[in-house]
Image: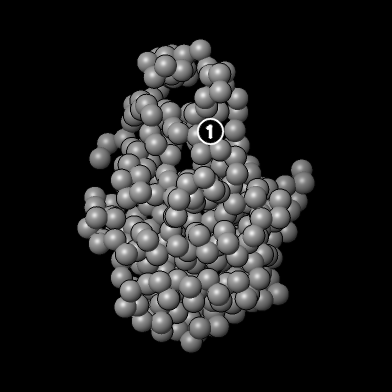
Amino acid sequence: MTGPREMPGAERANRRDRLLASAGWGEARRTNLAGDASFRRYERVQLGRRTAVLMDAPAPMEDVRPFVHVARRLTSLGLSAPRVLAVDIEAGFLLLEDLGDDTYTRVLARGADEHELYRLAINVLIDLHHRPVAEAAAEIAPYDDELLRREAGLLIDWYLPALTGKATPEAARRDYFDIWTGLFVRARLVPETLVLRDYHVDNLVWLPDRPGVAACGLLDFQDAVRGPVAYDVVSLLEDVRRDIEPGLVIAMRQHYLDGARNLDAEAFAASYAALGVQRNCKIVGIFTRLCVRDGKPQYLKHIPRTWRLIEHGLRHPDLRPMRIWLDRHIPPGRRVVPPALISQAAS
């Protein structure tokens, strides 16, 4: 699929204004909303008491088509993704339903019931995973081994060189990927579903006026794939941005297993461990890349927590080969923010 072309800024601005006008928002006031780790920007548009959100996703760095496809799939299933109100695919603009500012992150900071919110988020996954994969993930790309491998490689492509000051040796690279090839078999011991991939408190919105699982709004799912059911459970409960009490993690994993249909607990544990370590190795690499390549050092502070999550996942017996590899090449005492990046961030 060929993506949208790059468009001059003035032309994009005109396209944005025409989109808003054609949707009845031409006179709306626009204010910036927080961005994310991608090239996307967001604005809230307000007309009287009505509000909507404008996503600005410039090509060729971004492509809004996956977001539109997944949003419409989720809303068709009765889940609370933002409704797509207007689209300009070529220019990279979407006008979206405004789900408000009450992300899980914000309402938890205000003292909301953590158990209630996480239970609701798990209930969303149970509801989604009960759907036939042909219904939930039709026309969604698979989370194949090549993608999992490429993601895991971010650790040795970005973090390890930043730590050591030199490229990862080729023999170490081969061993690393050989281990992952075996672990991906363990990750696939569970059924497949629609995997949202960034299912965590920053991307969930508390919508208490909506019934059932619709009370949990969903954001940032344009990278969704068809993959193992354990992935989004890991994403929620192994959150690199906040500490979660171990007792809550245990309770929510059990709640998921209680609600899942015919899911073997040992297979789920193996998949959860393999995907958790894979995901967090990827994240350590991404946070490093955001600093080195994109000049965004604010994510470095999460690296120590991410390493703690990796070390927890390595306790599973299936992860022993990866534990040995990491102990050899990135021993526990070196699992830190690379000092060179601290200096870079301070300058």
Q: What colouring style does the render use? A: one colour
- Between 31 and 61, the residue placed more toward the observer is 31
Residue shown at 63% from the left, 61% from the top: 114
Marker count (numbered) = 1
Q: Is residue 306 above or below residue 331?
A: above
User: Percent from the top left, x then y, of residue 144?
Assistant: 31, 62
Residue under numbered circle 1 = 41
* Amino acid type assigned to the residue bearing label 1 in the image: Arg
Q: Is residue 185 above or below residue 37?
A: below
User: Percent from the top left, x then y, of residue 143?
Assistant: 33, 60
- Between 172 and 116, the residue placed more toward the observer is 116
* Residue farthest toward the bottom in the current orientation of the protein: 317
Residue shown at 62% from the left, 76% from the top: 247
Look at the numbered disc 1 and give the secondary structure of its residue: strand
**Image quarter (top left, top right, bottom left or bottom right) of the C terminus:** top right
Q: Quadrant of residue 21?
A: top left
- Between 299 and 271, the residue placed more toward the observer is 271
Q: Quadrant of residue 295?
A: top right
Residue shown at 53% from the left, 56% from the top: 200
User: Percent from the top left, x then y, of residue 48?
Assistant: 56, 18
